[in-house]
Amino acid sequence: MVLAYVLIVAEAGLEKDIVNSLSDTVGVQETDVIYGEYDVIAKITVSDISKLGDFIMEKIRPIKGVKRTSTLIAVE
């Protein structure tokens, strides 16, 4: 299992909509609106590293309001 944190830059005012969309997504463990350079953080798990890119490209980036992502892979 691979654990990663996805930092999301959102369009102004759409942060909570992104969090709500992500909370219904299989593989998303937690989401929060945050302050700073990024607007939303999502804790995700995928079965292996080869599925991480597809998860981000297919499940996160298409969400309305997502402008940019940055992914941090956790070391266990």
Image (cartoon, rainbow, N blue to C red):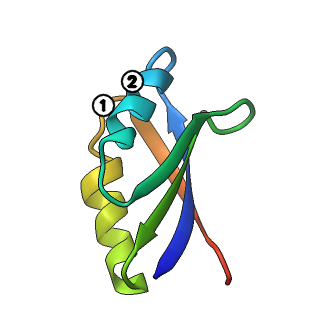
Where in the figure is residue 38, as x and y percent of width and height?
Answer: 64, 39
- Residue at 36 percent of width and 60 percent of height: 27
Q: Secondary structure at mark 1?
A: loop
Which kind of residue does numbered mark 1 sit on? Lys
User: Which residue, given by chain and number where applicable, does mark 1 sit on?
Assistant: 64
Of discs 1 and 2, which sits in the foreground? 2
Q: Are marks 1 and 2 in contact (CB under 8 Å)?
A: yes
When the figure is inspected, residue 1 is found, relative to residue 53, above or below; the finding is below
Quadrant of image for the C terminus: bottom right
Q: Is residue 39 left or right of residue 25?
A: right
Please, what secondary structure does the residue beneath circle 2 have?
A: helix
Q: On screen, 59 above or below 55?
A: above
Q: Residue at x 67, y 33 (%)?
A: 34
Residue situated in front as seen by the camera: 71 or 19 = 19
Horizontal and vertical percent for residue 40? Answer: 57, 37
Report the side of 48 relative to 9 (left or right). Answer: left
At label 2, the amino acid type is Asp
Mark-to-mark CA distance, 1 and 2: 8 Å
Q: Nearer the viewer, residue 22 or 64?
A: 22
Q: Which picture quadrant has residue 28?
A: bottom left
Taking depth in this image into account, of 28 and 13 the one nearest to the observer is 28
Q: On residue 17, which mark appears?
A: 2
For image coordinates 29% across by 69% down, the residue present is 54
In depth, the one of 57 and 51 nearer the eye is 51
